[in-house]
Structure formats: C-alpha cells, structure tokens
C-alpha cells in the first residue's frame, strides 16, 4: 500500500514538452484515473511513476521516498499493459507465478499466492491453459493476476481493457472495481474513455497537452468542470458549447447563443449573479449538457421553437439533435419522446445546469456559475 | 445505391461453421448494422458481400442480381476498414484520386477533380488535401478512408468497425457524422460493430449475430424493447439487462431467488420449466414503498445518472438512478419494478410472450 506524490514533474521527448509541471498526490488505497485524449501525456506520466521513463525535472515520491532515480524493479510497483504481454509458452499458472519464481519465493508459498490471486479473479479453472487458448478478457485477467501476485505497493494500469469488446469491457470494469475494493492497492489507471474513468475512479485527473487540467471526484469533474476542455471531455454525449451574449430584458436576462442563433430568457438567480459578477457580456461561452436541454412537445413559457434533426435512440433514452439557427443543441429525452426527424418541438435551457466559461481562456466562470 | 439480399448463406472455414444459414435483406438507402461479439461472423458476412470470401451454399444478390459468382471488383462495393490502409507516402488528394485512376473507369480528369472536391467537402478534409497521410490524426485518416469510398460512388458502403481504433470522444462525434453522411448520400450502408451503442444510435435496422447465427433483425427500438433471446437481451443495452433464474408455477413465471416471488403469466411453457426473468436497469425502481429489501453493493457514477448495484442474497441487480439522488454503498434500500417491463425467456433462451 502506498501514497504516490508527483511534484513539479517535467518530461521532454527531444523538443517535445510532454509533461508540464505536473503536481499530483495519490493517496494510499486510492483509485486515480488519468484521463485524456491520445498524446496528452497520461501514459508517459504512468510510465514515469513505474520507472519505465526517466523524468527531466521534479520528484516522484512513493511513501515519502524519492524514487525518480530508482530502477523500475526497485520501486515495488506492478504494471498492466493494454496488450497482455503474457509469455506464450507458459501456462496461465506459470505466467502468474513468474514474478514469484524470479524473486526465488519457495514452491509452496508460490502455489498459495497464485491460487489466492486466481481465486480473486475467478480464473482458477484456466490455470493450466496457455495464453493462445484464452479469450482477450481471460488473458487480461491473467495479466492482472501476474501484477497482483507480488502484492505490490501500487498497481499501474495502461488502458488494460481498451483492446476488449465493448460488452466485455463493461463486465471487466465492474470486476476491476470489485477487485480494488477487495485488495485496496493504490491504483493509477490510464484511459481515454471517460465512461471508464467515471465508473472506476475515486478521483479523476484530466490531462491535455501535458498539462493537468483538473483533479476531482467523478461528481466534481462532471458537475463543476474547471474549464471547457474538461467540460467537453467528460460526459457523453459531449456537453453543448456555444458562444453567448447576455442582454438584460426587463427584470430578467436574455442569453443569445452564437450568431443570433437563438435566445433564451432567464428570470431566476442568474441575472443577479451576472450583475454581481460585473463581468463584461462579451467573450462568454456557455456549456450545457444534453440533460440540461429541456424539451417540450407543446409551446410553453420560456421555451423556444426548434426543429428536431437526428434522433439517436440509445434504448434507455434518446439523444435528439435540435436545430437552433446555425447550430445544434443535443438534448437527452425519454425514449420515443420526439417522434422523428423534422418534428417541431420546444426547448429551454435549465439554468441550474448552465455553465459559463471565458471564451479566450476557456476557464470556468465560477462567479457566474454560482457553483 | 442498391439493395442487398442474403438467402440461406452458409460459410465454413474447414470444419468450423462461421455462418449458419443466414438470410437478410438490406433495403436501398438503409443503414444496416450487424452487431455481435468477436467471432460471431460479422466480418465474414461483410467479406462475403464484398466478394472477398465465397459461401459454401446460399445466394447473395445485389440490386436483385445474383452476384455469388462475381469478383470483388465487379460487385462495385466500397469497403472501409478499422485499419485505415491509406497509402502513407501519398497526399490525401492522391489517396482519393487513386480508386478513380484505372483506365477501365474511363473518367475524365475534370470529373475526377470534381468527385474528389465533393467527397473532401462531405467528410470535411478539404484543408488536408495536400498533406501526406502519415501526418494525419486517427480521426482524419478515417475521414480520408471514407472519402476514398465516397469518390467511387459505390452501390454499397461496407464498413468494418471503422470507429473502433479511435478515441472515445472522436468515436462519438464520428458516429453522428456517419449517420448524417449516410442520410445525405442516401446510400446503402452495412456497418459492422461489436459496440451496441454504435448500433443503436446509427442503425435503421440491426441484425444481431450470435455464433454464426442471425438471432434477431429489427429496428433499434424492437431489439431493445423485445429482445428475441437471452443473448440479445444481455448484449444490447448498457448496463446489461438484469437476468434472474426462475421457474414456471401454474400459469406464471416465478423468480425463485430468495424470497422474491415475482409473478408473471406465461403461455408457451409448461409447469416446472426453467425460465429466466429479465428487467432493464432503468426499469428497476428504488424507493421506500417498493416491495423488496436489499442492500447497495456498488455505485457507479455516470454523470447524468448512477448505476447502483443492489444485492439481495445471491442476487445482484443493477438499477439506473438519477445522479442527484443520494445513495451510498452499504445503504439498505427497497426496490421493485413495473411487472409490465419484465422480459421472460424460456429454457432454450427464447423470448416467451406474456399471457
């Protein structure tokens, strides 16, 4: 069990500045997910913790001890890759036992540990199989078993289920979480899939272009994204984003989207918050998640008419693209709520789910968002 | 543009049956998705239609003509693969021009330029035309591959997991783009995937393959709301449908797990038959007035909603609840559902209708 601290970590690949002044503290027994698009530096960060990459500046501490100059083997950390990297000529049993044999653990203890790990992963019946006869999911279970058998201080995983079928991925996700709850190893997990991050993480660290954008619980990053990047990276479907201007109108306020694409009136606490913030009404960008776009089939107070474009039925609910001037608003509705493409419906933005960002910097305007 | 028909097609690889008596019809201008896990026969079906494999029996027709003995080139279909297979040292423009070059096509240079320009506009790669393809991102490469299919104006677009190698975010946006593209072109699309979300969101019709057999064809709504068997029920929808063991007592199907006695009427079954009862996570309700007691085993955060796993004895049920509802691991809860939302499957896995 271990606490991992990254302090001012920087890494270059030649000219390319891939990790920029990274500070992150991973608590003992915590499950932290590094989330971001390909090339954002998440895997490099993970490999730096493992000792598979050297860092150019900064410190990496495991349980308070600087490890940046230690070999990977001396850091007592286990690594699981996307590609299973099993020894093809060895059985699942021998693959899992391998690290113990390498450490010259005696035979009966090795057997005990292999069987313990196999039981926790539900792969006891596969122990005598060779990797080539295993399914992708089972191969990854074996790889995880091999990582856990040494009882490492921390477990690092690089997209461990990224190569699996969608359905299998879902099941493995649950298994990984259960496993973590059971063995409690400090875990750092890299993925580009926000669903995986949301479902698994105690905290998510979102990276882009080598820069850490936000660290927080799934709830925090979803409901209070620190900037436009996080807002659009977390959540599916993607948060709607539009340039916007605020205009006062009587006692209330009007939010004009895009290039006069549409306007929505607000009378709640938003107008006063805007007034208090004293912010200029230009350079604003708004974001609203599809569930924050409320749709009605009849005209209603505060709703504006829009045309439904594409309807994506996802089973439990629908995602409907609404045409508003020159842009689209994606809304989440109950299944079959909007009959078909081309229908006229009415939409409103839920003030409580509206996010404001500075257009230039992309930073969330907490004073207006009231969060 | 053309319709496609498979009539009792069977394909063997050695002694292994890859496709077992497949019949399906894809209408002109339809977005048809073949959905199934790895090894179900999706790609084999696609390759049979493309003319890259020969079936042992059955007939394949395109635009009402039997093409079983036609070569791949004669079938005039375009294939877009998961791996982009672009020419790396060529520019995007050269990659798009390439399929139009053969003399047999007899296209004038002006016509070629026109087609390339139009295709580039449709897939939004106009600004990339003079770039080498090894300088492109994954999403851009996939757009170029699709563009290369479009310039040919094929009768059918065959797509083999074209989005699988892309980032989750990019996959989501390309999903909407592809659907939009297909609507605009009015083209016949056969799209193969293991991702049920892709199937649900894009398809006019979905065909679900299980171990070489086509187990259901229907609209996304039909597949989701009336799955033909347990496999489809579990494969389509996320989280997977909750399934419980049960038995037929008198004229009702009863879930025997612990003290749960969910009663349902069923017809096509006999007393004592083993049945499976299914309920989707979004149909499971949690509240103080619900009939069954349980305990919260796990909570997965999904943004707009949470997926709560409830345990009662050996039974683990997943429920989708609004993210705003506070609920914690180990909390005692009560749960239940609308009986009208239950699915029943017989011992052979097939859907039973309710009485």
Image (cartoon, grey):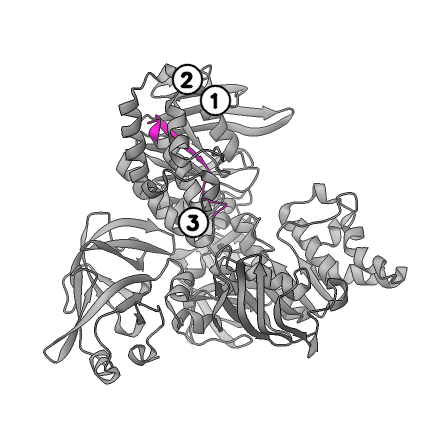
Across and down, in percent, residue A152 comes to 73, 67
Residue pointed to by mark 1:
B51
Q: Mark 3 touching mark 2, by CB under 8 A?
A: no
Q: Mark 2 touching mark 1, by CB under 8 A?
A: yes
Tag 1 subunit: B
Q: Tell me the number on the disc at residue A320.
A: none
* Residue B272 vertical placement versus A180 (above, below): above
Residue drawn at x 77%, y 55% as measured from the top left: A96
Q: Are marks 3 and 2 on the same chain?
A: yes
Lower position in the chain sequence, tag 3 or tag 2: 2
Q: Is residue B286 left or right of residue A348?
A: right
Viewer-proximal residue among B259 and B52: B52
Across and down, in percent, residue A281 comes to 21, 73
Residue pointed to by mark 3:
B171
* Residue A367 vertical placement versus B271 (above, below): below
- Magenta range: B151-166
Residue drawn at x 51%, y 38% as measured from the top left: B83
Tag nearer the camera, 1 or 3: 3
Whether residue A98 can be seen here: yes
- How far apart in space, not on screen, are marks 3 and 2 (Cα)? 32 Å
Instruction: Mark 3: give few (<14), some (14-19) or many (20+) Cα within 10 Å.
Output: some
- How far apart in space, not on screen, are marks 2 and 1 (Cα)? 9 Å
Picture quarter with the N terminus of chain A: bottom right
Q: Secondary structure at mark 1?
A: loop
Q: Secondary structure at mark 3?
A: helix
Q: Tell me the number on the disc at residue B74.
A: 2
**Residue occupying the far left of the picture:** A250
Tag 3 subunit: B
Viewer-proximal residue among B284 and B58: B58
Tag 2 subunit: B
Q: Write down the quadrant of residue A290 in the picture.
A: bottom left
Q: Secondary structure at mark 2?
A: helix
């Amino acid at each position: 069990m271990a606490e991992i601290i990254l302090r001012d970590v920087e890494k270059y690949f030649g000219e390319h500045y891939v990790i920029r002044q990274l500070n992150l503290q991973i608590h003992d027994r915590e499950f932290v997910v590094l989330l971001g698009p390909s090339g954002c530096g998440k895997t490099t960060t993970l490999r730096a913790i493992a000792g598979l990459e050297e860092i150019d500046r900064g410190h990496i501490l495991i349980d308070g001890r600087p490890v940046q100059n230690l070999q990977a083997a001396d850091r007592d950390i286990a690594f699981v890759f996307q590609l299973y990297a099993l020894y093809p000529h060895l059985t699942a049993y021998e693959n899992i036992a391998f690290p113990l044999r390498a450490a010259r653990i005696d035979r009966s203890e090795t057997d005990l540990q292999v069987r313990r790990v196999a039981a926790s992963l539900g792969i006891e019946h596969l122990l005598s199989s060779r990797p080539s006869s295993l399914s992708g999911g089972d191969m990854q279970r074996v790889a995880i078993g091999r990582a856990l058998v040494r009882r490492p201080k921390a477990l690092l995983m690089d997209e461990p289920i990224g190569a699996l079928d969608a359905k299998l991925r879902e099941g493995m996700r649950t298994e990984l979480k259960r496993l973590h709850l059971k063995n409690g190893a400090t875990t750092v997990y890299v993925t580009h899939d926000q669903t995986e991050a949301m479902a698994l993480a105690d905290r998510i660290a979102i990276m882009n272009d080598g820069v850490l954008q936000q660290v927080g619980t799934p709830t925090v990053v979803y409901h209070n994204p620190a900037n436009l990047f996080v807002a659009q990276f977390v959540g599916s479907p993607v948060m709607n984003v539009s340039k916007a201007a605020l205009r006062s109108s009587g006692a209330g306020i009007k939010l004009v989207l895009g290039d006069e694409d549409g306007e929505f009136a607000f009378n709640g606490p938003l107008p006063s918050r805007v007034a208090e913030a004293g912010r200029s009404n230009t350079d604003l960008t708004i974001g609203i998640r599809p569930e924050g776009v409320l749709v009605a089939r009849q005209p209603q107070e505060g709703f504006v008419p829009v045309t439904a474009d594409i309807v994506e039925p996802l089973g439990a609910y629908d995602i409907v693209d609404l045409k508003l001037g020159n842009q689209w608003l994606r809304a989440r509705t109950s299944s079959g709520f909007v009959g078909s493409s081309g229908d006229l419906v009415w939409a409103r933005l839920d003030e409580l789910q509206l996010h404001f960002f500075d257009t230039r910097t992309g930073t969330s305007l907490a004073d207006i968002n009231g969060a | 543009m053309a319709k496609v028909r498979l009539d009792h097609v069977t394909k063997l690889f050695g002694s292994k049956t890859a496709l077992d008596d497949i019949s399906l019809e894809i209408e002109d201008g339809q977005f048809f998705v073949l959905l199934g896990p790895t090894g179900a026969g999706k790609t084999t079906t696609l390759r049979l239609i493309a003319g890259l494999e020969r079936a042992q029996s059955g007939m394949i027709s395109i635009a009402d003509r039997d093409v079983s003995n036609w070569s791949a080139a004669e079938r005039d279909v375009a294939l877009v693969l998961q791996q982009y297979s672009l020419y790396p040292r060529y520019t995007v423009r050269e990659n798009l021009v390439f399929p139009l070059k053969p003399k047999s096509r007899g296209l004038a240079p002006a016509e070629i330029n026109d087609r390339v320009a139009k295709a580039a506009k449709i897939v939004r790669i106009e600004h990339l035309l003079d770039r080498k393809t090894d300088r492109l991102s994954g999403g851009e490469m996939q757009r170029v591959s699709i563009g290369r299919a479009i310039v040919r104006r094929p009768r059918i677009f065959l797509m083999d997991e074209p989005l699988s190698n892309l980032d989750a975010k990019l996959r989501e946006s390309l999903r909407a783009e592809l659907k939009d593209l297909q609507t605009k072109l009015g083209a016949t699309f056969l799209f193969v995937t293991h991702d049920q979300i892709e199937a649900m969101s894009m398809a006019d019709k979905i065909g679900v393959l299980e171990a070489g057999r086509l187990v259901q064809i229907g609209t996304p709504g039909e597949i989701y709301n009336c799955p033909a068997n347990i496999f489809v029920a579990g494969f389509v929808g996320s989280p997977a449908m909750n399934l419980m063991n049960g038995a037929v007592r008198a004229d009702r199907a009863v879930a025997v797990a612990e003290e749960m006695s969910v009663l349902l009427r069923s017809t096509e079954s006999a007393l004592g038959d083993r049945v499976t009862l299914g309920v989707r996570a979004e149909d499971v309700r949690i509240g103080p007035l619900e009939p069954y007691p349980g305990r919260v085993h796990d909570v997965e955060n999904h943004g707009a909603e949470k997926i709560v796993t409830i345990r009662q004895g050996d039974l683990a049920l997943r429920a989708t609840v609004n993210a705003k509802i506070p609920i914690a691991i180990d909390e005692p809860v009560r749960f239940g559902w609308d009986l009208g939302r239950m699915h029943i499957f017989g011992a052979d896995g097939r859907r039973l209708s309710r009485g």
